[in-house]
Amino acid sequence: MKKEIITLMCATALLSSCHIYKSYDRPEDITVEGLYRDTVAGGDTLAADTANFGNLPWKEVFTDARLQALIEQALINNPDLRSAALTVKQAQAALMSARLAYAPMLSLSPQGTVSSWDKGKATQTYSLPVTASWQIDLFGQLLNPKRKAQVSLKQTQFYEQAVQTQVIANVANMYYTLLMLDRQLQISEATCDILKRNLETVEAMKEAAMANSAAVEQSRTAYAQVLASLPDIRQSIRETENALCLMLNQPAQSIARGALEEQQLPSEFSTGIPLQLLSNRPDVKAAEMSLAASYYDTNSARAAFYPQITLSGSAGWTNSAGSAIVNPGKLLASAIGSLTQPLFYRGANIARLKQAKAQEEQAKIQFQTTLLQAGNEVSNALYQYQMTSDKAVSREIQVNSARKAAEDTKELFNLGTSTYLEVLSAEQSYLSAQLSEVADTFDRMQSVISLYQALGGGRE
């Protein structure tokens, strides 16, 4: 008896060394160091802390009540998010099926016949058997598919979280795009009003012989140029509203919104340590679960080389005992044990193992690539915010100077010491500076959204 136990223990140790029973562990050569670039030093690694901007609830990042309502609506109605939730349900059903594979299979198959020989008395035979079969999982043929189903469920759940973070970021981006376009339209309309009054003034001056026709045409050209830009802005607003409605899964309609200058987004950020990307980014976690699923596929391919042991049996009532008919029926029972050892299809198993190993290596490469991509997105968002912040200082100076130049040039024109062409040039420079300032503000807001998403924000 001791000899049998020692043999069994040795066999178990041998199988464990072949990874048949071993759970997935993250590969040691997956690196997470140096994922973030410093926003100031050219090639230095960013010194991170233990906090993480991505851990903030999305309502603390996007404080506009109208935007919050739109995000909540999208989280309920967005078709991509609803489809991801259904994928999770499918994975849950697959896991249940894998778990039930451990239970015996039971079936009831009643049979009955009526027969008569040479017009003799009919005889009736029947059987009411219950059959059962149970696979003994000594070599991981059931364990590894169950573990794969578990990590596949986690993968779909992380995918759903990734879709959610994407939906939140897209809704916020579209909302702020609308605010930017609204402000650009407001500036352009106000400039149009100014240029229209200027045109009327120059036409009156021409009638009074104080200006020539060239000044009138120059004024009319400047007014028409800005006026022609308004339809493009309005079209962009309409298309952005329609795209946002599509995200909300509702018919195209106008979107209630606030003003660009009312928005307040966080200005101080913590990126956390790079290792947190493994626990915060849903797409990174989903990529790792894909690697784990491939690992268990490889284990299943290894397990196919070992015997499959099945116990089966049946019990029930029958009145047919060989050629005799017994009434009432008697109890019938049988038990069978079977062992299936792969022999002639070993080549197919070897090919399957090679294929599984190659797929596992591909999943590992994809996991590492996803992790590096996540680090790049964090680095890009941090640098974009830094650059737009630096640009904002210079842009404010440009806008103030352009406004003062437009005012002074117009005053000089009224005094007769400046030409109207100089007035138009100053007005156009002021308009261009204002529109650029609005675009810079949007870029800065967009960098905050990108950083929040890159750090795994909005997953809960």
Image: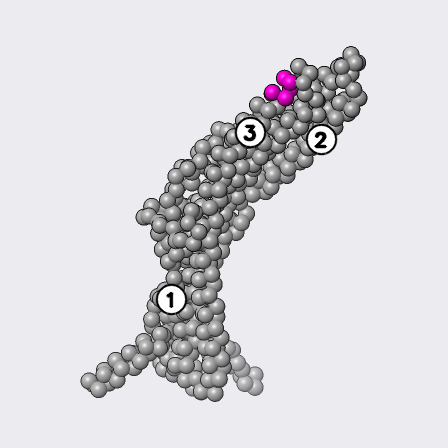
* The quadrant where residue 104 appears: bottom left
Up/down of 410 relative to 263, above or below: above
Label 2 to label 1: alpha-carbon separation: 60 Å
- Mark 3 or mark 1: whose residue is earlier in sequence: 1
Q: Is residue 174 magenta?
A: no
What range is drawn magenta here? 408-412
What residue is rendered at 58% in x and 30% in y? 434
Circle 2 sits on which residue?
225
**Residue 189's spot in the image, x, y percent?**
64, 26
Q: Choose between 47 and 314: the one closer to the eye.
A: 47
Secondary structure beneath label 1: loop
Circle 3 sits on which residue?
399
Residue lying farthest to the left in this orientation: 2
Label 3 to label 1: alpha-carbon separation: 52 Å
Residue lying farthest to the front in this orientation: 417
Up/down of 13 relative to 386, above or below: below
